[in-house]
Image (cartoon, rainbow, N blue to C red):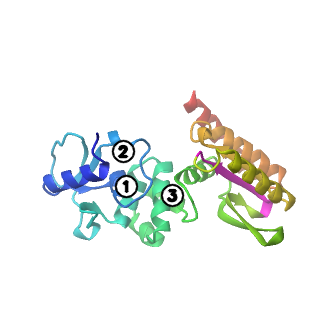
Amino acid sequence: MHASLLDRARLFTAAVPGAIACLRTAAHVWGLNALSESEDGWPVELAVPHPVEVPGCAVHVTALPSADVTRHRSVRVTTPERTAFDCARRLPRPEGVAIVDQFLRRGVDHDRLLRRATGSRGLRETLAMADRGAASPRESWLRVILVEGGLPRPATQIRVDLPGGRLAYLDLGWPAFLLAVEYDGHEHHTSAADRRRDLGRRAALRAAGWRVIPVRRDVIPGRGADVVEQVANALIECGWQPTSGQVTRILGRLRAARRRRW
């Protein structure tokens, strides 16, 4: 039986002088959904002040100020703010934004993160994409894919009043065009009852004038270009009038994404 990532983080931060759990390991210690695969094989990511080899760990040599280090669940770990900043700085943008989104929902100050990002345009762009309204990491990924695809930034958790005093909250969308995009994850959309509820909810949204595009789990991220193209066409059909520059950017992003895919 494999030791949990939390247990291994406790062990290594206690055994390795100066070691601090960082990046996705730190996010996991803070209780976030931060790992892209099972924790069984996930290395403990450590920040250490001097080079050292630690089997089963991914070591990053860096000197952290004491204000960025704390103890949580018996692990020496980077603070939530520092963990969010490091993930935005060092991880691929969809992963970094997904982690920052979760930290924002837990109270990390977005403005403080932006003030840290001096001298790095790419980092500031990543942090600026964050949104505390994202309800799951895959929703964050979906938002990043749409924005990087050249589409206008969608709002999150859009409230829609339905007949009979009912409320619906849409994952992502553009209220001015009554268009929404929703991520259908396995955890909430697989049973017959889930599907019936989704059908009834979306029928009510259509009656209220909304168009909803569902995106399945298996589409993100591999078929992100297809999603961008579908949503761009839907936005235009709903009244969006992109500039020639926006059209050029979208087409360029689609071509680049499809070249990478193949």
Which comes sooner in the sequence, label 1 or label 3? Answer: 1
Image side of residue 246 versus residue 29, left or right: right
Does the CB distance between marks 1 and 2 fall below 8 Å? yes
Is 1 placed above or below 124 here? Answer: above
Measured as percent of width and height from the top left, residue 186 is found at: 59, 45
Image side of residue 17 versus residue 218, left or right: left
Question: What range is drawn magenta here?
Answer: 176-186
Which comes sooner in the sequence, label 3 or label 2? Answer: 2
Q: Disc 1 residue type?
A: His
Q: Quadrant of the C terminus?
A: top right
- Residue, disc 2: 39
Instruction: Please name the residue shown 28% across and 63% down the image.
Output: 73
Mark count: 3
Q: Disc 3 residue type?
A: Glu
- Residue, disc 1: 28
Measured as percent of width and height from the top left, residue 173 is found at: 70, 58
Determine if the magenta segment contains residue 184. yes
Instruction: Please name the residue shown 23% across and 66% down the image.
Output: 65
Instruction: Please name the residue shown 55% across and 63% down the image.
Output: 131
Instruction: Please name the residue shown 34% across and 53% down the image.
Output: 23
The alpha-carbon separation of the residues under discs 1 and 2 comes to: 9 Å
Q: Disc 2 residue type?
A: Glu
Is there any visible trace of residue 169 in the rendered image?
yes
Q: In the image, which is nearer the foreground, mark 3 or mark 2?
A: 2
Q: Foreground: 46 or 202?
A: 202
- Residue, disc 3: 125
Mark 3 secondary-structure assignment: helix
Q: In the image, which is nearer the foreground, mark 1 or mark 3?
A: 1
Which comes sooner in the sequence, label 1 or label 2? Answer: 1
Is 60 placed above or below 256 here? Answer: below
